[in-house]
Image: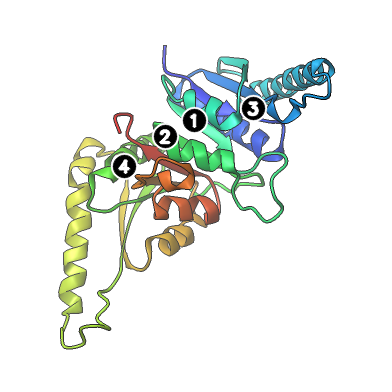
Amino acid sequence: MSDPVVVGTDGSAAGSAAVEWAADDAARMRAPLRIVFALDRSPYDIPKFSTREWGDALTRNAEKVLTEAETLARERRPEIEVTTQAIEGAPAVVLRDQADGAAEIVVGSRGLGGFAGAVLGSVSVHVAGHARGPVVVVRAGLRTAHGEIVVGIDDSPQCDPALAYAFEQAVLRGATLRALYAWQAPVHAYAPEIVYDMDEIRRAQHQVAAAKLASWRQTYPQVKVVEDVRSAHPVEALNAASEKADLVVVGSHGRGALGSLALGSVSRGILHHARGAVAVVRSPRA
């Protein structure tokens, strides 16, 4: 049996959008769908008050949310196998741990109880920064299909897992793959005597992108690839490209052990500001 697509939901609009996205992807992959609710009792664990009534209410709410999510998934994609599971623990930790043996983890961009000014919830940041394999962050709202996947590339090995996932998504969707390589012109404010040949620099950047994609083109000859080489900041370029993309795929260069430091600055910037769904792909062996 194929590895399952795992989606976390909390009954919010973003959680429901994540369930819909995950059901569609599970159907494309011909994989089972597992819907997970993290039953976190810690906010209600107050010594002066009995937790029995709170616990019963929390359990009933988890069952209600999972039943509604399962109904939503089955109505959207009746051909897929759907299971549900309530797991005790903090949502970020529960979903992170689900990555083992999962084809991908899907989460909503914001859950219930988020700060009004927050663009992205802490759960999404933590899971994307720590879970191995693909983590897809989905925003609520209407989505228009564009038939294009965008993947950010550079000359490092960290983007290889993202390229593999992006090509697979392009195959499953029959979509065009836009491989975006953003580079920035040299800053010579502190060395004005250095003269740069900008035409030569542009040619060199195009060669970097072409070399990175060469083997992937051979492996996936059926995918139409657009090499998009721009002189721009990677976050700005990827955010602009996200307006006409069904999915933006990035790797992660993060090396930190805690919080958002486990995400690189580019993947963190895309997660916060991209217009649609974003997949952060970390190597399972990282």
Q: Which residue is mark 4?
A: 163
Q: How far is disc 3 from disc 4 in space, using C-alphas?
A: 29 Å
Quadrant in which the N terminus is drawn:
top left
Relative to 154, residue 159 above or below: above
The mark tally for this picture is 4
Q: Provide the secondary structure element on which disc 4 rests.
A: helix
Where does the image place residue 161, in percent across and percent down from the top left? 31, 38
Q: Judge depth for marks 3 and 4 and give the one in front.
A: 4
Mark 2 vs mark 3: give the one in front. Answer: 2
Q: Is residue 241 above or below residue 82?
A: below
What is the basis of the colouring in this image? rainbow
Residue linked to disc 3: 76
Q: Amino acid at mark 4?
A: Leu
Residue furthest bottom in the image: 193
Relative image position of residue 215 (x, y in whole percent)? 18, 42
Residue at x 25% of width, y 83% of height = 190
Q: Nearer the viewer, residue 46 or 17?
A: 46
**Regarding mark 3 in the picture, which secondary structure is present there?**
helix
Left or right: residue 139 compared with residue 165: right
- The answer to which of marks 1 and 2 sits earlier in the sequence is 1
Marks 2 and 4, how far apart in space?
11 Å
**Residue labelled with disc 2:** 134
Q: Which residue is mark 1?
A: 105
Q: Find numbered disc 1 in the image and state the secondary structure of the residue it sits on.
A: strand
In the rendered structure, the answer to whether residue 82 lies left or right of residue 199 reads: right
Pick whichever of labels 3 and 4 is earlier in the sequence: 3
Q: Are marks 1 and 2 in contact (CB under 8 Å)?
A: yes
Using a 10 Å C-alpha cutoff, classify the residue at mark 2 as few (fewer than 14 neighbours), some (14 to 19) or many (20 or more): many
Residue 63, located in which quarter of the rendered image?
A: top right
The residue located at (50%, 36%) in the rendering is: 127
* Separation of residues labelled 1 and 3 (CA atoms): 19 Å
Placement of 82 over or under 94, stated as above or below: above
